[in-house]
Amino acid sequence: MKPSVYFMVCFYTIMDKFMASLGYCDISNFKLTPKSKHAVAEIQGIMDAGNLMAGVLAATPFYYIFGSPGITNSPFEKMITIREYDWEQLGQSMASVPKIVKGRIYKVAEPMTWSTNGQERKFWECVSNASL
């Protein structure tokens, strides 16, 4: 049994290397139950999926501009395509990724506060509050 459990959930988006810290919870002298371990693994999966989603969103315009078979190889036409691409929509999409990830983490952490007690409950309350 570890003397304390540290839980840090960080999500990094590709754009601007923005870091949204979803929680740092230090609760001493407790051990996670199997149900809590499963919830932590689920949160890690959510974070991995969020990182993948941010990567795919960031790569989409490059594929559209440089890899799309419908676009000719003319540098002039590529410049037109770059200029006309909806960069604002891409920025809004990228900005929504951390909100989506935090919301999904909250949906995992909040029910854990209802079904745990003691130090473990304090831990999940911290994770839940940090993901709001």
Image (tube, grey):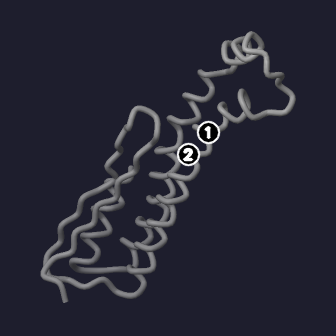
In the image, residue 20 above or below residue 82: below
Q: Which residue is painted at 29% across and 74% down in the image?
A: 121
Residue placed furthest toward the right: 70
Tag count: 2
Q: Residue, x 79% and y 22% (percent of image)?
A: 73
Q: Which mark is residue 55?
A: 2
Disc 1 target residue = 59
Residue 124 position (above or below residue 67) = below
Residue at 67%, 21% in the rendered image: 86
Image quarter of residue 87: top right
Q: Amino acid at mark 2?
A: Gly
Residue count near mark 2 (Cα–Cα under 10 Å), binned few <14, some 14–19, many ≥20: some
- In the rendered image, residue 57, in percent from the top left (x then y), is placed at 61, 40
Q: How far across and down, in percent of the image, does residue 63 sit? A: 70, 35
- Residue at 58%, 37% in the rendered image: 58
Residues at circles 1 and 2 in contact by the CB criterion of under 8 Å? yes
Q: Is residue 52 above or below residue 120?
A: above
Q: Classify mark 1: helix, strand or loop.
A: helix
Q: Decide which of 46, 126 is in the foreground and name it.
A: 46
Q: Secondary structure at mark 2?
A: helix
